[in-house]
Amino acid sequence: MSEGKLKINSENIMPIIKKWLYSDKDIFLRELVSNATDATSKLHILAQQGHIPPLDNDTFAITVTLDKEQKLLTISDHGLGMTSDEVEKYITDVAFSGAAEFVEKYQKDEKEGGIIGHFGLGFYSAFMVAQTVQIRTRSHKEGATAVLWTCDGSSTYTIEESFREKVGTDVILHINDEEMLDEGKLRSILHKYCQFLPYPIFLGETQINDKEPLWTKKPSECTDEEYLSFYKALYPMEEDPIFWVHLNVDHPFHLQGILYFPKVHPRFDFQTASIKLFSKRVFVSDNLKDLFPDYLTVLRGAIDSPDIPLNVSRSYLQMNSTVKKLSTHIAKKLGDRLKSFATNDREKFLSVWGDMETIVKLGALREESFYEKIQDILVFKTLKGEFLTPSAYLELYKESYANKIFYSTEDESTAFLNMYKEKGIEVLKGGGPLDSALFNFLESKLGCSFQRIDGGLSELILDDKEKEKSKEEECPHKELTTFVKESLGLEYVTVEAKGLTSKELPGFVMIDEGVRRMRDYFAMSQKEMPRDAFSKHTFILNTNNSLVESMGKLQKSSPELSKKLIQQIYDLSLLSQKEMHPEALGDFIKRTGVVLEELALAASKD
């Protein structure tokens, strides 16, 4: 038996490795199983090249064995193995450049994020959970004998001859962390990090990995069923995705992967990053916000690349030019895939548009190049049930609607919406959480204006008599509007009376488009909106409505009832347009009963 010292240029490196190197102690099992996989792969290559005899299938298995009583955890492989000299070279000489500088830095600044590069320290993560680590290994080289290396976490070790029947390596951990003696915990760690490794991984008698990563196949060889099955393997509790993009990049970096568009629902968490990063099939992280533009972090899926720079513990991305190029490339590929989807399978694209429009719209707002890519597929549903892009809408109706694009936030038929339908005025259905910002953006791009149908009084919905009155009289219906204004007693409300083409609608509240968008901005950004800052609006009475006519007749005979009726029409307008303050609802309901009783009494007297 011989003794030696770890050649690490510092007595202090082991405590630093154990305490600061890894953000998550679970990683030790990932590192040791990854090392076993590498050793197995190398032996496999030698056999394929004819340097050694063909191997049995059992040779490729990697086994994790737990002995609770002895507090031992053993990771065994039948891979390349090591000679005594190789153990000295690869294990005892902790091989990374600048070890002394590394120690000096961490004595001054103990911040995990500063460790960078690949230092070949994965094996030493074992000391985070073990007080002593042993390696029993036998090289594949002819005539090699087994050796046993032992280290208690200090800078000294022993190495001696041993016995191992077959070629390969056992890494034996004398566990001092009780949590790592729980079989369920170990199974969870292995499934998280090792479920796609190329060789069978066993915990006792149970195989952990039974699925091949689909990203290793060519897209032309994959079926829809395989894509959906792979998605379920990654996200067992989620609904089926809308569609997917299969990535296979060779230049200027190597990357494979599959990204899925999930269904976006009201409870969808946009802040949760869910794309999984692998390096040579080993799970690394799902914290990839630096790798993707923020509008694409909601995607699901997996990517595998040996070229993405990681910190030493292989847990975090390091931003550099490669990552930035990769981010740009992924966004471009997704834009291409969306456009292809919309072109080649338009019916399906339109059927799932509602599930993914939020992501696409956010991308258009966030990144100019992405907007340029998808502008021809950025669609809105029309009153006719068709889909139009804003540019197509302008091409059809630019002259008719004075370069305006009318939109509505209502999905169902309302009296106001019906008025537009009856006049044959085309309206886009918008009003999603991003639409206010998107309309601002598109107005600058298309040189037009977006107007919600109740955000302005278009001549298109005035009847012919009203149009003539507006030309002849400076203030038509002045007596009526004055009475209504006084009855409401609200300084911030302007009153107008107009003859609309529809007799169904008694009135509506008209809010300036700019004011509405400012309110939407405050709501979306979760900023506190100044109270009453955006209260100003216009109340439009429809003189063609029978209820308004009745109110006018009551103005002289029963002015108090007429005032209550005015308040009722005003509140109904607020309620139907979702503008009523919740605190006012109780008074509205109470007044409704009073007004109905008084109207019934007045009718009985007549």
Image (cartoon, rainbow, N blue to C red):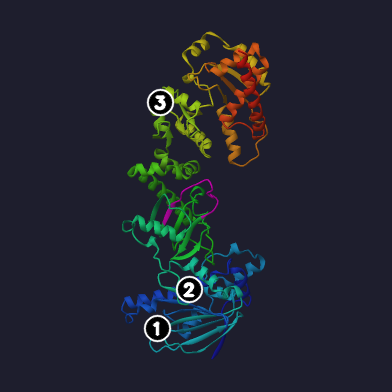
Q: Residue at x 36, y 58 (%)?
A: 226
Which stretch is magenta?
Answer: 258-273
| Residue 67 percent location from the top left of the image | 54, 81
Q: How far apart are marks 3 and 2 (CA)?
A: 65 Å
User: Which of the two marks, 1 or 3, is nearer to us in this view?
Assistant: 3
Tell me if mark 2 has few (under 14), some (14-19) or many (20+) residues whose alpha carbon lies within 10 angstroms of its own: many
- Is 558 rendered above or below residue 570? above
Does the magenta run of residues contain 476? no
Give amino acid for label 2: Val
Disc ID at residue 33: 2
Question: Marks 2/1: CA distance?
Answer: 19 Å
Q: Which of 7 and 196 is in front in this view?
A: 196
Q: Which amino acid does label 1 sit on?
A: His
Residue under label 1, please give it: 140
Q: Name the residue under label 3.
A: 397
**Secondary structure type for disc 3:** helix
Of callouts 2 and 1, the N-terminal one:
2
The amino acid on which the numbered mark 3 sits, given as a three-letter code, is Tyr
- Mark closest to the chain's N terminus, 1 or 3: 1
| Vertical side of 10 occupied by 278: above or below | above
Can residue 251 be spotted in the picture? no
